[in-house]
Amino acid sequence: MAVPKKKQSKTRTAKRRATWKGEAPAYSACPQCKQPKLPHRVCANCGYYAGRQAVEVE
């Protein structure tokens, strides 16, 4: 089994992990009510999805 000959430095490890960043979710505007909503999901404000009423909202 292959085993590393030297310990990997903290700098090298940190450089590799530097690309693992959390991102804020992308929002889009609802075409019906213009409120921000997550893409590919029913609008929580009006209940529309893909141009039709998907859920009854009170």
Image (spheres, rainbow, N blue to C red):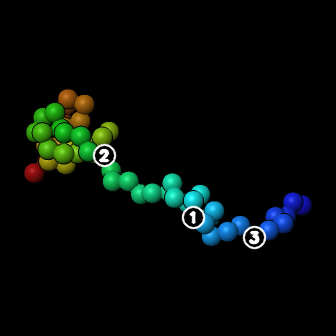
Q: Amino acid at mark 3?
A: Lys
In the drawing, does residue 11 fall left or right of residue 50? right
Q: Residue at x 81, y 64 (%)?
A: 4
Q: Indicate the secondary structure of the residue bearing disc 1.
A: helix
Picture quadrant where residue 17 is located: bottom right
Residues at badges 3 and 1 in contact (C-beta under 8 Å)? Answer: no
Viewer-closest of 43 and 16: 16
Secondary structure type for disc 2? loop
> Is there a contact, CB below 8 Å, between mark 3 and mark 2?
no
Q: Amino acid at mark 1?
A: Ala
Residue type pointed to by label 2: Ala
Q: CA distance from mark 3 to mark 1?
A: 14 Å
Q: Which mark is residue 14?
A: 1
Instruction: Specify which label sits upstream in the sequence, 3 or 2.
Output: 3
| Foreground residue among 39 and 8 | 8
For marks 1 and 2 on the same chain, the one whose residue lies earlier in the sequence: 1
Q: Residues within 10 Å of mark 1 (few under 14, many from 20)?
A: few
x, y percent for residue 3:
85, 64
Front residue of 51/31: it is 31
Residue 50: % across, % down: 25, 31
Residue at 60% in and 66% down? 11
Q: Which mark is residue 7?
A: 3
Q: How would you rate the neighbour count of disc 3 (Cα within 10 Å): few for under 14, some for 14-19, many for 20 or more?
A: few
- The answer to whether one can see residue 58 in this image is yes
Q: Label 2 belongs to which residue?
A: 26
Identify the residue at horizontal 32%, vertical 39% (top origin): 40
Point out the tag, 3 or 1, that comes first from the N-terminus: 3
Q: Which mark is residue 47?
A: none
- In x, y percent, where is residue 48? 19, 37
Seen at 33% across and 53% down, the residue is 24
Residue extending farthest top: 51
